Amino acid sequence: MPAYRPPHISPSEITPKDIYLSRRSFIGAAAAAGFGLAAGGEAWAAPLSAAPGPYKLNEKLTPKEAVTTYNNFYEFGVNKEDPSQNSGAFKPTPWSVKVEGMVGKPKEFGLDEILKMKLEDRTYRMRCVEGWSMVIPWIGFPLSAILDQVEPLGSAKYVAFETVVRPEEMPGQGGLFQPLPWPYIEGLRMDEARHPLTILAVGLYGETLPNQNGAPIRLVVPWKYGFKSIKSIVKIKLVEEQPQTTWKNSNAREYGFYSNVNPAVDHPRWSQATEQRIGEGGFFGTKRVDTLPFNGYANEVASLYSGMDLKANY
């Protein structure tokens, strides 16, 4: 991952909401969930109904415009504005997620079934390994709700994830020189995957996920650096051995398997002691706050790593 650069995006570079929405192609998802369509057959951002979740934050939400125009999604390009500018051709429907491996009942979940899960509002901090952070109101459901349906075997110790590969729709996957090997892959230990904080998100700010934020379904693990929360998932596999992960394979010295947010363990090229909170001190302001161990979720997750050397297991 490139060295951290403070975010400076002029208003002229931000995709206007009306243009952004008109490019959305959530027709199938909206129809499956019973949502209305805009005139001419184009799908608008479909509202999602969700129950209040158990996790809330008494912190200012990051502006939606920032959440949807400043992010990393290398499948659409390596610059922060690339996902919002280059994802208009991506088709998040039809969609399905295969869950397989060491399970008693492998299953392929269609998007209509996924959207009918018991959805919850979950407001989480999101901390990027580059040193910036956001507070995002997600809509999703615990990953364990899907894992329970496939009946994991006792020998399954890890959960591996894989994203979609569509170079014709994802320009960052095309061309001679690639920033990463595709597909993007990630993994969690089974107890991490089953933790109540770990969710599969299908929306943010009360609507279906935008293409640039991982439509139609992505992982969110709030106590880990953001690159662990893999986007546009097509496969989940339960395995016995620790799975390969994209960033660890690309640079193991800088990106470990666990990637827990830890202000006491610096990235080899920059400090992790503080972070730039996007959207505070101006739209893309420069306010810095102290980084919290496990991104502020230590009370919930620190016990998962009892006895582990968190500097060695970064």
Image (spheres, rainbow, N blue to C red):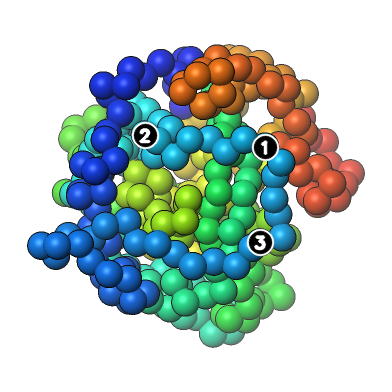
Q: Of callouts 3 and 2, which one flags the residue occurring earlier in the amino acid sequence?
A: 3
Query: Label 1: which residue?
Result: 59
- On the question of residue 78 being in view, the answer is no
Q: Give me the residue at 27% from left, 61% from top.
A: 26
Marks 1/2 in contact by CB < 8 Å: the verdict is no
| Residue density around tag 2, few if under 14, some if 14–19, many if 20 or more, within 10 Å | many
Image location (x, y in percent) of residue 306: 87, 47
Write down the residue under mark 2.
Answer: 69
Amino acid at circle 1: Glu
Q: Amino acid at mark 3?
A: Gly
The answer to whether 308 is drawn above or below residue 189 in the figure is above
Of callouts 1 and 2, which one flags the residue occurring earlier in the amino acid sequence?
1
**Identity of the residue furthest to the left in this view:** 40
Tell me: 205 left or right of 300. Answer: left
Q: Which residue lies under the disc numbered 3?
A: 53
**Which class describes the residues within 10 Å of circle 3: few (<14), some (14-19), or many (20+)?**
some
- Where's residue 91, x and y in %? 23, 58
State the SS at label 3: loop
Label 1: element kind: loop
Residue occupying image coordinates x 24% and y 43% = 18
Q: Is residue 12 visible?
A: yes
Q: Earlier in the sequence, mark 3 or mark 1?
A: 3
Q: Nearer the viewer, residue 289 or 21?
A: 21
Q: Which residue is painted at 52% across and 58% down in the image?
A: 139
